Image (cartoon, coloured by chain):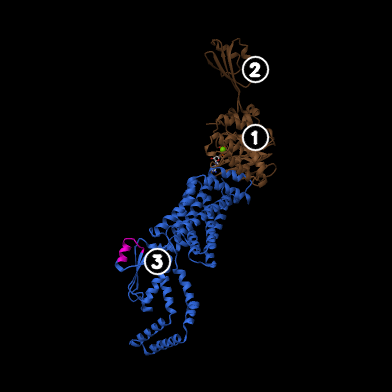
Chain colours: A brown, B blue
C-alpha cells in the first residue's frame, strides 16, 4: 500500500510538486498522467527517497522512511533515465544488481534467466548493452527493477522512445505483474497507456493533481460531449428539417455529412434516424483522457 | 562489506571495457617512467652507470683514493682521460661529465675545503642538469670517503699538524698569546698521535665520530643510484593520478547517466557506494603498482632501498589520491566539468609537488608551496623508501599527511553526496 499526503517540493523557483496526496491500495495500479514537466519524475523520486520533500509524508507498506534498507528491498523503481551499464552485458548488469540486493547465487541465476526471458533478451544476454536498440535497453532497464521481486513497483515513463513491439512487451509484462498482486505506480504522458493499464488515474499538471478517479469516471466528469459524424446517402436539401432531429444547435453541414456534439450519442442517433434519411456511415468519437486533460487545463497532453 | 567489493568489481569491469581508460591508467604512467627515465639517463649507457671521465692533474695519494672511491660507485662508469680529450667528449655528449681534479687537491685540509679556489671542477652538458645533480652528490660522497680514510691515517694527520705548526710559527700577524695557544694544541695532537696505536685510531674514528657524521652526510648526498629512482616515484604518482581521475570521471558519469540513481534506490548507503568506487580505484592502483614495480626491477634494474616502506608509501599515496578524487567527483555536475576540474587539480598538484620536474629544479620561492601538494608528499614518501633510506619515524611524516588528506577528502565527499539532491 502506498499513501502520500500533502507532498511539496520546490526547486529554486519552480514548484515541481504542489500539495500532492493520493493513496494506492495493495495490488492496484495507479497512473500519474501529465505532460512533460508536470512533476511525475519528482513525485517518483520523493516516493523512493532519492530526494526529500519540503513538506508532506510518504508511506510505503506503512513505513514512512523509504531510505531504510528493508523498505528499499521491497521497492522496485524503473527510472526514466536509463539506469544500466552500457559497458556491461545484460547478464552482467542483472548479476551486479542482484548482488546489490543480496540475492544468493542460486536464486539469482534463476531470476536472471527469468528476467532475460521476460525482456526477450535471452539470446543476446552476453552482448554489451551499448550495442542494443533503444527498445532493448528500455526492456532491460525495466527487468533490472523486477529482479528482486519488489512488492511495490514505481515505473517512470517506461515506454519513452521505444518501438511498438517493445512497448507491447512492456505492457504485457506490467499486466502480468499486476496479476501477481503487486502495487504499481505508473507515470506517463500517453493517455492510451493510462487507460489500458491503470485502475485509477491522477491528472497531474504543474505539480498539482487536478483530479483522481478511474478512467470512466474521469471521462464522465471532464470528458465533455461525444463527437458524431453522420454521412447520408443523398445530399441534404432541407437543413431546417434535420435541425429538428438534433438537440444541438451547433451543427455543421457539408454536402451529405453532418457533425455535432452530444453527451448522449446513442439517443441522439436514434432520434436522427427518425428523420427518414438513410445513413451511409456513422462515426461516434466518445471523449477520452486527452479531452479530460484539455477540459481541465485548456491544453493538450502533448504540445 | 561484500557489497563494496561487488561494486568495486563492477567498476573495474566497466573501466576496463574502455581502451582509453586502460591507456590513462596503465600505459601513460609506464610511458612516463620510461620516457623521462631515458631522458635523464645516458641513452647509450643504459640506466645503470653514468659515464664520466676523470682527469687527475694532482696525482697525489688523496686523488688516487678519491678516484678509486668514484670507481667503486655502481652509478658511475669512470674512464681516465686528459683534460682536452675529456672536455671534447663532454661536448660531443659521449660522456655525461668530466671531473677534473686540479693540482693541490691532496695538499690537505685547506685545499679540500677552500671554497674560493675549488680543486675539483665538473664539466657537464648544461642540458643534462639532472645528471650533474647526481654527480655532485656522488662526488661529495667519494670525497668524504677518501677524506675519512685520511683521518684514520696517522702519518697523514701528523703531516697536517706539522704543516699548521710551521704556518703559525711563520705568521707575523698573529698575537703571540694566540699563537702559543695553537702551538699547545698542536703539541697535544702530536702526543695523541704518537701514543695511540693505529688500530685504535681507526676504530675511534670509524666507530664513533666519523660514522656518525658520515650517516648524516650521506642522507643528504648519497643520492639516487640510477635516474629511474627519481623518475619512478613520479611515474607512480602519474599512474595513481591517472587512475584516480579516471575513477572520478566514472563516478560523475554514473551520476549523470542514471545508474547512480539505481544504486541510490538499492539497499546500500551512499558511503558504501563511494567506498566501492574507492576500493575499485585502490585495487586498480595496486595492480598498476605491481606492474610498475616488476617493470622497474626487470627493465630498469632499479634498486629499492626498503621494500616494505615502499609498499607502505605506495598505499598511503593511493589512499590519499583516491580520497581526493572521490571528493572531486562530488564537486562536478557534469562529466566534462568533473573531468576538467579533476585534471586541472591534478596538473596543479603535480606541478607544485614535483610530479613533472624534481623539486630541486624549482625556483626557491616556489618550493614552500609544494608542501600544499599531496604529490610532493607522495613522491617524498616513495623516495624515502627507494633511495633516501628513511627511518620509520621519517617515513611517518609524509605517510600520515597522505592518510589525513585522503580520509578528510573522502569524508567531505560523502558529506557532499548527502547534501546534494539529484
Ligand atoms: N533538479 C532539478 N532542479 C531544478 N528544477 C528541476 C529539477 N528536477 C526537475 N525540475 C523541474 O521540476 C519540474 C517537474 O519536473 P519533473 O518531475 O521531471 O517532470 P516530469 O517527470 O513530469 O516531466 C520541471 O519544471 C522541471 O524543470
Ligand atoms: Mg519525468
Name the residue: 59% across, 10% down.
A278
| Residue receiving disc 1 | A30
Q: Chain of mark 2?
A: A
Residue plotted at (67% across, 37% down): A23
| Tag in front: 2 or 1 | 1
Q: Are marks 1 and 3 in contact (CB under 8 Å)?
A: no
| Up-down relation of residue A219 to residue B323 (above or below) | above
Q: Marks 1 and 3, Cα distance to the nearest angstrom?
A: 80 Å
| Numbered range of the magenta stretch | B85-96
Q: Earlier in the sequence, mark 2 or mark 1?
A: 1
Q: Are marks 2 and 3 in contact (CB under 8 Å)?
A: no
Mark 2, secondary structure of its residue: helix
Residue B65 image-quadrant placement: bottom left
Image depth: mark 2 or mark 3 in front:
3
The residue labelled by disc 3 is: B135
B136 with respect to B88 (left or right): right
Instruction: Report if residue A157 is visible in the image.
Output: no
The location of residue B374, given as percent across then percent down, is: 49, 59
Amino acid at each position: 500500500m502506498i499513501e502520500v499526503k500533502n507532498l511539496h517540493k520546490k526547486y529554486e523557483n519552480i514548484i515541481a510538486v504542489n500539495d500532492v496526496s493520493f493513496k494506492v491500495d495493495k495490488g492496484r495500479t495507479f497512473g500519474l498522467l501529465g505532460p512533460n514537466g508536470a512533476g511525475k519524475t519528482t513525485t517518483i523520486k520523493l516516493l523512493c527517497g532519492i530526494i526529500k520533500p519540503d513538506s508532506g509524508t510518504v508511506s510505503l507498506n506503512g513505513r514512512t522512511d523509504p531510505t531504510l534498507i528493508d523498505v528499499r528491498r521491497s521497492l522496485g523503481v524503473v527510472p526514466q533515465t536509463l539506469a544500466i551499464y552500457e559497458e556491461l552485458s545484460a547478464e552482467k548488469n542483472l548479476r551486479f544488481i542482484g548482488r546489490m540486493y543480496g540475492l544468493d547465487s542460486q536464486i539469482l541465476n534463476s531470476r536472471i534467466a527469468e528476467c532475460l526471458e521476460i525482456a526477450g533478451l535471452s539470446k543476446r544476454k552476453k552482448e554489451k548493452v551499448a550495442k542494443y536498440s533503444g527498445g532493448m535497453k528500455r526492456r532491460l532497464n525495466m527487468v533490472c527493477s523486477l529482479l528482486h521481486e519488489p512488492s511495490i513497483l514505481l515505473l517512470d515513463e517506461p515506454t519513452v522512445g521505444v518501438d511498438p513491439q517493445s512497448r507491447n512487451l512492456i505492457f504485457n509484462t506490467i499486466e502480468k505483474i499486476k496479476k501477481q498482486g503487486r502495487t504499481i505506480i505508473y507515470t506517463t504522458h500517453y493517455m492510451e497507456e493510462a487507460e489500458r493499464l491503470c485502475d485509477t488515474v491522477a491528472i497531474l499538471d504543474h505539480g498539482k493533481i487536478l483530479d483522481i478517479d478511474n478512467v470512466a469516471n474521469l471521462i464522465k466528469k471532464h470528458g465533455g460531449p461525444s463527437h458524431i459524424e453522420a454521412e447520408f446517402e443523398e445530399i441534404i436539401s432541407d437543413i431546417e428539417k434535420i435541425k429538428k432531429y438534433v438537440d444541438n444547435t451547433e451543427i455543421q453541414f457539408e454536402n451529405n455529412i453532418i457533425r455535432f456534439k452530444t453527451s448522449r450519442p446513442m439517443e441522439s442517433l436514434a432520434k436522427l434516424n427518425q428523420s427518414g434519411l438513410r445513413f451511409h456511415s456513422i462515426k461516434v468519437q466518445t471523449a477520452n483522457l486527452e479531452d479530460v486533460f484539455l477540459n481541465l487545463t485548456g491544453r493538450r497532453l502533448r504540445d | 562489506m561484500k557489497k563494496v567489493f561487488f561494486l568495486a568489481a563492477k567498476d573495474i569491469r566497466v573501466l576496463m571495457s574502455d581502451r582509453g581508460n586502460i591507456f590513462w591508467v596503465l600505459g601513460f604512467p609506464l610511458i612516463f617512467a620510461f620516457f623521462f627515465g631515458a631522458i635523464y639517463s645516458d641513452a647509450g649507457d643504459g640506466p645503470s652507470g653514468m659515464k664520466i671521465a676523470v682527469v687527475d692533474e694532482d696525482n697525489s695519494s688523496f686523488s688516487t683514493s678519491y678516484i678509486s672511491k668514484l670507481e667503486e660507485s655502481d652509478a658511475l662508469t669512470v674512464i681516465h682521460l686528459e683534460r682536452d680529450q675529456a672536455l671534447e667528449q663532454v661536448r660531443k655528449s659521449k660522456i655525461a661529465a668530466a671531473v677534473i681534479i686540479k693540482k693541490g687537491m691532496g695538499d690537505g685540509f685547506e685545499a679540500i675545503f677552500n671554497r674560493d679556489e675549488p680543486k675539483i671542477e665538473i664539466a657537464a652538458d648544461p642540458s643534462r642538469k639532472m645528471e650533474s645533480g647526481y654527480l655532485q652528490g656522488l662526488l661529495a660522497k667519494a670525497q668524504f670517503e677518501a677524506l675519512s680514510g685520511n683521518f684514520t691515517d696517522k702519518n697523514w694527520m701528523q703531516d697536517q699538524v706539522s704543516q699548521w705548526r710551521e704556518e703559525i710559527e711563520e705568521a707575523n700577524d698573529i698575537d703571540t698569546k694566540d699563537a702559543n695557544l695553537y702551538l699547545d694544541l698542536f703539541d697535544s695532537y702530536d702526543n695523541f698521535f704518537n701514543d695511540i696505536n693505529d688500530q685504535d685510531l681507526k676504530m675511534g674514528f670509524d666507530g664513533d665520530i666519523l660514522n656518525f657524521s658520515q650517516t648524516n652526510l650521506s642522507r643528504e648526498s648519497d643520492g639516487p643510484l640510477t635516474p629511474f629512482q627519481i623518475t619512478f616515484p613520479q611515474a607512480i604518482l602519474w599512474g595513481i593520478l591517472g587512475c584516480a581521475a579516471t575513477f572520478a570521471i566514472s563516478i560523475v558519469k554514473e551520476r549523470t547517466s542514471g545508474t547512480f540513481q539505481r544504486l541510490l534506490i538499492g539497499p546500500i548507503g551512499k558511503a558504501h557506494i563511494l567506498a566501492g568506487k574507492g576500493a575499485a580505484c585502490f585495487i586498480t592502483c595496486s595492480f598498476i603498482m605491481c606492474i610498475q614495480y616488476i617493470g622497474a626491477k626487470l627493465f630498469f634494474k632499479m634498486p629499492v632501498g626498503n621494500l616494505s616502506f615502499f609498499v607502505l608509501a605506495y598505499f598511503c599515496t593511493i589512499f590519499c589520491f583516491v580520497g581526493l578524487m572521490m571528493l572531486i567527483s562530488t564537486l562536478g555536475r557534469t562529466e566534462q566539468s568533473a573531468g576538467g576540474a579533476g585534471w586541472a587539480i591534478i596538473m596543479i598538484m603535480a606541478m607544485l609537488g614535483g610530479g613533472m620536474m624534481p623539486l630541486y629544479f624549482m625556483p626557491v620561492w616556489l618550493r614552500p608551496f609544494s608542501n600544499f601538494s599531496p604529490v610532493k608528499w607522495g613522491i617524498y614518501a616513495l623516495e624515502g623508501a627507494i633511495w633516501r633510506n628513511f627511518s620509520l619515524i621519517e617515513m611517518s611524516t609524509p605517510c600520515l599527511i597522505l592518510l589525513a588528506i585522503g580520509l578528510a577528502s573522502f569524508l567531505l565527499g560523502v558529506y557532499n553526496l548527502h547534501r546534494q539532491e539529484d
